[in-house]
Image (spheres, grey):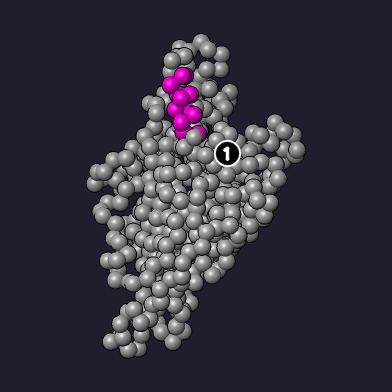
């Protein structure tokens, strides 16, 4: 767990795979295991392995958990959070299988898994999902139980977001994916609300870089939707966009606070990503150019927008300047991260073309390259390679 909380996902995965193998040799994976605490230990190992396998794009290392007839939420003696997380692990395995497969029925599988998540959530009372009315005071045991429950809730919403994320941006051209867009954005908001609550409450008492990274992926998801928005939105949608932007800015402020002391490396890198995307304003009508972001264990984002000048015969390379060289991260990023893009207030800017390729879910067809868009300049920011290092790796901006 130290590796996971420290952001070293690959090392954590190797450690838990070794634990899986040792546990199987000890026989704690069997229902008949007589090792004291063996079954509980095995379940914890399996859950951690599924979590890391999903983030790393790897297959699970064990078969699904089997539940006894008495293991239901109606049983007053059952550990509700423990049972819920075990059932989530089985659902995580289904998402991993979908991601690993290259079949043409991915969306049908997605809908089936979504029904499983929805049914599981409805089995728990609303009081279990409430996290803002914690009344346990400063008692360590009560605080630990509460923290564990909120982390499981975050895991649930992360699964929902990862499930629908590959289809979210397709909703712009295919209405059948509207539900995926709605579900992904809703789950991202739930993640951010819980992240802000935990970080504000326990800001100085815990280190969990993978939690910061989960908040980043949720924030980037909201930003992708905001960037994709164009003119003509209804008032209700404008209100929701304002709320989403407020959430993004709240995460940004909090991560800036965390990164001040130099220990919040992931938070500092996340600040760079958020500021870079915030600088892309789809409604300003003043920016044009290309942007490519590569974020470890999340995916690659391509954003492009062209200008339409009054003189249609003017060549494209006359209105889009070449981007300036990227600089290594070291200090806080500013809104100038998108400074390679030209500014022409007198010209009309097309709505942005947003493309996202998930690192866990392969695209259904070869990714359209930036060259195919016919745009000469691209600002490229590599926030580490997707599979080469851990979260705290060499992110370059």
The stretch in magenta equals 12-23
Please tell me which residue lies in front, 269 or 244.
Answer: 269
Seen at 24% across and 43% down, the residue is: 103
Q: Which residue is mark 1?
A: 5
Q: Which residue sits furthest bottom?
A: 311
From the viewer's perspective, tell me whether residue 291 is left or right of residue 193. left
Q: Which residue sits furthest left?
A: 104
Relative to 382, say whether 86 is above or below. Answer: above
Residue 308 percent coordinates (x, y): 35, 82
Seen at 63% across and 57% down, the residue is: 256
Residue 236 percent coordinates (x, y): 49, 67
Residue 311 percent coordinates (x, y): 32, 89
Secondary structure beneath dot 1 equals: helix
From the viewer's perspective, tell me whether residue 135 is left or right of residue 39. right
The answer to whether residue 347 of the structure is visible from this angle is yes
Residue 90 percent coordinates (x, y): 42, 32
Q: Quadrant of the N terminus?
A: top right
Please tell me which residue lies in front, 361 or 270.
Answer: 270
Seen at 48% across and 64% down, the residue is: 326
Q: Which residue sits furthest right?
A: 138
Relative to 65, say whether 144 is above or below. Answer: below
The answer to whether residue 179 of the structure is visible from this angle is no
Residue 203 located within the stretch drawn in magenta: no
Question: Mostly what secondary structure, the magenta segment?
Answer: helix
């Amino acid at each position: 767990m130290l590796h996971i909380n420290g952001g070293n996902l690959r090392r954590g995965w190797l450690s838990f795979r070794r634990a899986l193998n040792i546990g199987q040799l000890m026989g704690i994976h069997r229902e008949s295991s007589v090792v004291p605490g063996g079954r509980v230990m095995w379940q914890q190992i399996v859950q951690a392995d599924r979590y890391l396998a999903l983030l790393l794009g790897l297959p699970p290392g064990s078969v699904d958990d089997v539940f006894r007839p008495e293991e239901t939420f109606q049983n007053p003696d059952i550990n509700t959070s423990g049972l819920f997380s075990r059932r989530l692990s089985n659902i995580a395995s289904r998402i991993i299988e979908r991601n690993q497969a290259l079949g043409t029925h991915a969306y049908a599988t997605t809908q089936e898994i979504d029904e499983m998540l929805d049914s599981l959530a409805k089995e728990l009372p609303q009081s279990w999902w409430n996290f803002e009315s914690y009344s346990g005071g400063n008692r360590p045991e009560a605080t630990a139980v509460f923290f564990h429950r909120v982390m499981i809730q975050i895991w649930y919403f992360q699964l929902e977001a990862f499930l629908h994320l590959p289809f979210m941006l397709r909703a712009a051209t295919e209405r059948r994916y509207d539900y995926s867009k709605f579900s992904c954005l809703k789950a991202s908001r739930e993640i951010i609300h819980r992240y802000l609550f935990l970080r504000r409450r326990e800001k100085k008492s815990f280190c969990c870089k993978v939690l910061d990274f989960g908040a980043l992926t949720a924030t980037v998801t909201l930003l992708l939707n905001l960037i994709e928005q164009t003119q003509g939105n209804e008032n209700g949608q404008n209100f929701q966009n304002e709320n989403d932007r407020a959430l993004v800015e709240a995460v940004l402020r909090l991560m800036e606070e965390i990164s001040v002391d130099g220990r919040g490396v992931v938070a500092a890198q996340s600040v760079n990503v958020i500021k870079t995307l915030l600088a892309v304003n789809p409604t300003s009508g003043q920016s044009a150019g290309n942007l490519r972001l590569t974020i470890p264990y999340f995916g690659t984002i391509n954003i492009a927008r062209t200008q339409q000048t009054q003189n249609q015969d003017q060549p494209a390379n006359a209105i889009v300047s070449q981007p300036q060289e990227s600089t290594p991260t070291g200090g806080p990023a500013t809104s100038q991260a998108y400074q390679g893009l030209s500014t022409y207030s007198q010209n009309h800017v097309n709505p942005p073309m947003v493309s996202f390729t998930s690192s866990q879910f392969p695209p259904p067809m070869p990714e359209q390259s930036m060259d195919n868009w016919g745009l000469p300049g691209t600002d490229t920011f590599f926030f580490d390679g997707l599979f080469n290092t851990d979260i705290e790796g060499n992110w370059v901006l």
